[in-house]
Amino acid sequence: MGSRASSLLREEEIEEIKKETGFSHSQITRLYSRFTSLDKGENGTLSREDFQRIPELAINPLGDRIINAFFPEGEDQVNFRGFMRTLAHFRPVEDNEKNKNAAVSEPLNSRTNKLLFAFRLYDLDRDDKISREELLQVLRMMVGVNISDEQLGSIADRTIQEADTNGDNSISFNEFMKVLEKVDVEQKMSIRFLH
Amino acid sequence: MLIDSCGFSPSRSAFVMSSRIIPVVLVLLVGSVLHTAAASPSDHETNHTALTNGTAHQKKAFPVLDLNYEHVHAPFEISLWVLLASLMKLGFHLIPRLNNIVPEKKVPPVMNADVFFLCLLPPIILDAGYFLPIRPFIENIGTILMFAVIGTLWNTFFIGGLLFAVCQINPGYTMDLGLLPCLLFATIISAVDPVAVLAVFEEIHINELLHILVFGESLLNDAVTVVLYHLFEEYAGAGTVTVLDGFLGIICFLVVALGGVLVGAIYGILAAFTSRFTSHMRVIEPLFVFVYSYMAYLSAEMFHLSGIMALIACGAVMKPYVEANISHKSHTTVKYFLKMWSSVSETLIFIFLGVATVDGTHHSWNWIFVTATVILCLIARVIGVIGLTYLMNKVRIVKLTTKDQFIIAYGGLRGAIAFSLGFLLNEEHFPQKKMFLTAIITVVFFTVFVQGMTIKPLVELLAVKKKQEAKRTINEEIHTQFLDHLLTGIEDICGHYGHHHWKDKLNRFNKKYLKRYLIAGTRCEEPQLLSFFHKMEMKHAIEQVEKGGGSNVPSALPSTVSMQNIQPKKPTVEPERMLPKLPKGKEDEIRNILRTNLQKTRLRLHSYNRHTLVADPFEEGISDIILRKRKSLNTHINNYLTVPAAPPDTPVMSRARLASDPQARGAKYNADNVPTFQVDLASPQSPDSVTLLNELKKVEDQGLMMKAPSSKSMEGERDQQKLTRCLSDPGPSADEDEDEPFLK
């Protein structure tokens, strides 16, 4: 994790990040400049306040959760490596990923990993299940104040019913994947990083 | 009388006269019998068309039966044609659309270009625009625009230039075709036609991406066609086109395209605004949709802007707001009228095309020209598609494969618009008009016949991805929205102003300003998720009512389904049945139907058992279910009457609590097992809760029996929750007001 105070990005680091995330050189440097512009404290790491300073994130219903997703368990600071690791999930899937060496486990931006990232945003207590309460929380955040609890509750129930195949009244990761199999996740969860 | 009806009147044209022979022949005998006496018209006809000489008003034998064909001849013929078209469509829907049938005794009416552009084309385009799938359209808008604009330009110049070169080989034979007429011809022939594309692609059920690409292209290239057509037509007479003209042409293109969209959008907003106030006059709602759209089209055509783009913009802009405002029945009306009109139009267009083919007066066959045109069209299309795809794939996330490219190229059909544009050419300026028309018809024939017929087997052969038939589930809806928010957030973190950023901004603008003014009542604050949920429930309820009755009774009773499932729940057996939340009106309907049907079944059971040896096990089960259902209903009614109203938790507070500490919400929920009746009168910001209260009142007045959709677990608290849920139906109040008089 080593939070180094240096604000320059060295070549070895770039290479390592490239290998880990699959970003290209120019993308990494561009994102690094973004990282430094966000980093007001100039200590090479970002804290939650740095993220919250982004104005659009404040009005995003999922803003808090997204910010939390960047920080590993229990940590309050994220360095550039962690930043890139999270962003790597949103890299577009390319066809020539297949010829990577088999030793590297599935790249971070594979469909499964994308879905896992989204799943973890729902599943806060990390029990690998989206329970009814967790679903309700997310629904409440997305839908706003005008909807009563019962309506929301019925939506949540219906959602779980549709997805739940093993009857445990919550959505596991496999059920989550199955429900979204018709959705083009590779396109939906990709951002075209401009060069 | 006979003489008059044979129409020796000056105001009729030759075609029309000869086409009246059939009706005249049919009534010939009757007429001759009745009118042996005199030839002059009688008094009672003076209020008909003024063919009567009106001189001698002497009294004669009162004509018991009379024939006055001119009076009705125009609508009569139109109706006859429409009827013929529809009958043919009934009979020949398997055979390709172009019918060369020449009605035996009639001289066929040739299509008038005005009729085509003003009457036949708008319904098809409006139908397409109103039901345009917006999301894929916007997602692929870059690709679509590239194909429409650059693709069409490339086609035009390639075909025009090479055709000119070909014609230079033998100038005499091809009537001294200059460069500009060639380019004009190329403009007409190079645009992909929306009518033909719609007609063919509808049948092959191809996946959404390809459909929207080809179809979007066919719609948007209208602007290019309009500009180029006028440009070349103007300057073909002059003989040269300067750079300045080219520059003006580009500006003109922008004006035409954007102007058309603007006109359409304005009319769309007007229509949406009008529909806000129609809650008291539901019957005229569809009229507004149609008339405003047609006006948009005509206004755009008036200014030489792109009428098609105006129509598409109008339909697309007005749809979300109008759908929220109009009643369910109006929505159905609009949908089916549009489909009906566009279907008839399409058939008529193809009939006219077929007729025009056979009608020799417009043709002048010219081997070189025609074959060159056909070949060049194909080549230009293929090269254009390949080139553009190569460029676009560098920027697209989802790349287009070779298969996709093939389908896009193959699906570039030409149709009636090309023919009509050719028809509009002035013969004096363009002595080669007949040659043009022949070539156009040949290309249209070729693309529609050959390509159109073979595309379906090719799609199967190449195993191109087909359209997914299944409806969107609520899971997909929720998660898609979730992902949208997520992606917007990530884009903001990256500082990248991408797709999602602008989409989000548009949504916010929409919610803040437009929805407030354009959607009636409280629906404007309803989040998209909720309206989607309502729609689903409504659809589901209607399906159930349609199914419900007779032996399907168990499926209509959610509680009984759960009780019947003694074995472990089969996941594949429609879990939705377990938990439908029916809007109130439908609930009553179902109740009535069930009550009558249930009684019938029981009676039937009795008599049946007496006379048959083998009792139907299914029917036996029914009586058990009926008994159990009655029992459960009774218990739940008691529960309902004693449910306490928990202290209301204002939404603001709950959101605040949620925002600060996400886990607290969960904890609180577990503690409060009693369901919350959000009778939140005090809070001003929840209009939905007020309607909730009104509905509660209504419910109590009617003494509504509680339906009991119990869950699989049958815990007490869950039952109560679901009870409250049934009551808390927030269905569009406008809709229910309208429905009640019809149901009760």
Image: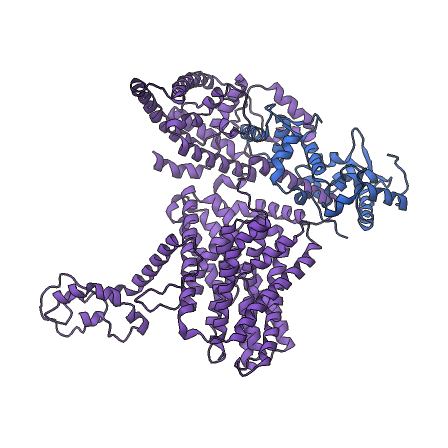
Chain colours: A blue, B purple
- The answer to whether B730 appears left or right of A142 in the picture is left
What residue is drawn where x is 11% and y is 69%? B36
- The answer to whether A168 appears left or right of B42 in the picture is right
Nearest the viewer among B570 and B135 is B570
Where does residue A7 sit, x and y in percent of width and height?
Answer: 88, 44
Nearest the viewer among B689 and B450 is B450
Nearest the viewer among A15 and B717 is A15
Q: Quarter holding the N terminus of chain B? A: bottom left
Where does residue B656 sit, x and y in percent of width and height?
Answer: 65, 30
Where does residue B217 sit, x and y in percent of width and height?
Answer: 57, 58
Nearest the viewer among B118 and B193 is B193
Q: Is residue B412 visible?
A: yes
Q: Is residue B429 above or below residue B667?
A: below
Q: Quarter holding the C terminus of chain B? A: top left
Where does residue B148 sit, x and y in percent of width and height?
Answer: 59, 61
Q: Is residue B98 above or below residue B494?
A: below
Quarter where residue B23 is shown:
bottom left
- The answer to whether B314 appears left or right of B658 in the picture is left
What residue is drawn where x is 14% and y is 72%? B39
What residue is drawn where x is 40% and y is 43%? B329
Q: Is residue B263 visible?
A: no
